[in-house]
Every structure is written in structure tokens, then in C-alpha cells.
Image (cartoon, rainbow, N blue to C red):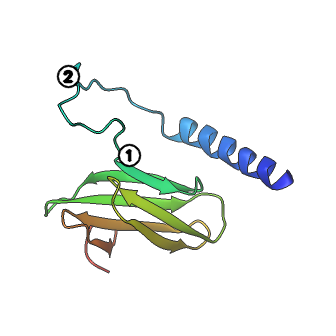
């Protein structure tokens, strides 16, 4: 379908742009060869952001608290509602304007707070 082809093209453009602008850095992580007893067969993703037009610009530990900072960017110039899931928890929906950048603080209790670029509450 034309809509499906447009979505495929958008995904290819975003992938190429991210590869060019933010090349992946490899790192080593060790996992034991056998899963613990009663372990889940498939773990939920650490952070799942949909649709593909919302890209993660930054993910880091907060400077002053025990929290994570997530910076999200709408990359295709469209209004969209992002769906964000952290470690398989509840889905958080956040509206984005075209090319909007949002910075959010996620605390261990699951609270999401909008913050500015230097991590102060808005």
C-alpha cells in the first residue's frame, strides 16, 4: 500500500540519518551462559519508544538524583503521540509537535517529569 511504502521509506531515512549523525559505539557486556532458575524466556526492552519518528537523543543518569534523563526528538516534522515503555511497565503517551525536543526525568518509582536541558523541572 502507498501508506506502507511511505512508512518503510520514513524508517529507512531515519535509520540512515541516525547512522550518519550518531554512529553506534560498541561495548562489551558479560552475561552468564545459563539463565537463572524461573527466569523469563524473553525480557522486555529496557526502553521502547514508538513510533519510529520519535528518536532517543540522550539517555543518561540524572546529575543530582537517582533517576534517568531521556531526551526525545520528533524527527520527521509531524505531529505525533509517542508511546514510551520503560522496562515493560505502563505505556506513557506524550504528544509531540513537529521537530519538538522533550527532556524527561524518570525516577525509580516510575514517575515521569518534564525537565529542561539542565534537568530542572519545567
Q: Is residue 114 above or below residue 77?
A: below
What crowding class fits label 1: few (fewer than 14 Cα within 10 Å), some (14-19), or many (20 or more)? few
For this orientation, the residue located farthest to the bottom is 122
- Viewer-side residue, 22 vs 94: 94
Q: Is residue 35 left or right of residue 66?
A: right
Would you say the residues marked 1 and 2 are in contact, meaning their CB atoms lie under 8 Å apart? no
For this orientation, the residue located farthest to the front is 38
Quadrant in the rendering for residue 85: bottom left
Residue at 44%, 33% in the rendered image: 24
In the picture of the structure, the residue carrying the numbered disc 1 is 45
Residue 96 is situated, as x and y percent measured from the top left of the image, at: 54, 71
Residue 33 is situated, as x and y percent measured from the top left of the image, at: 23, 18
How far apart, in angstroms, are the residues tagged by discs 1 and 2?
A: 19 Å
Q: Is residue 120 left or right of residue 89?
A: left
For this orientation, the residue located farthest to the right is 2
For this orientation, the residue located farthest to the top is 33
Residue 78 is situated, as x and y percent measured from the top left of the image, at: 66, 67
Q: Quadrant of the C terminus?
A: bottom left
Quadrant in the rendering for residue 105: bottom left
Q: Is residue 76 above or below residue 116?
A: above
What crowding class fits label 2: few (fewer than 14 Cα within 10 Å), some (14-19), or many (20 or more)? few
Q: Which mark is residue 8?
A: none
- Viewer-side residue, 2 vs 41: 41
In the picture of the structure, the residue carrying the numbered disc 2 is 32
Amino acid at each position: 500500500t502507498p501508506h506502507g511504502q511511505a512508512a518503510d521509506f520514513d524508517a529507512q531515512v531515519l535509520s540512515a540519518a541516525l547512522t550518519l549523525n550518531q554512529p553506534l559505539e560498541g561495548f562489551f557486556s558479560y552475561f552468564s551462559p545459563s539463565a537463572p532458575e524461573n527466569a523469563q524466556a524473553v525480557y522486555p526492552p529496557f526502553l521502547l519508544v514508538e513510533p519510529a519518528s520519535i528518536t532517543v537523543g540522550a539517555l543518561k543518569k540524572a546529575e543530582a538524583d537517582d533517576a534517568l534523563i531521556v531526551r526525545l526528538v520528533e524527527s520527521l516534522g509531524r505531529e505525533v503521540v509517542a508511546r514510551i515503555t520503560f522496562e515493560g511497565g505502563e505505556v506513557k503517551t506524550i504528544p509531540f509537535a513537529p521537530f519538538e525536543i522533550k527532556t524527561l526525568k524518570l525516577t525509580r518509582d516510575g514517575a515521569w517529569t518534564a525537565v529542561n536541558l539542565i534537568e530542572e523541572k519545567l
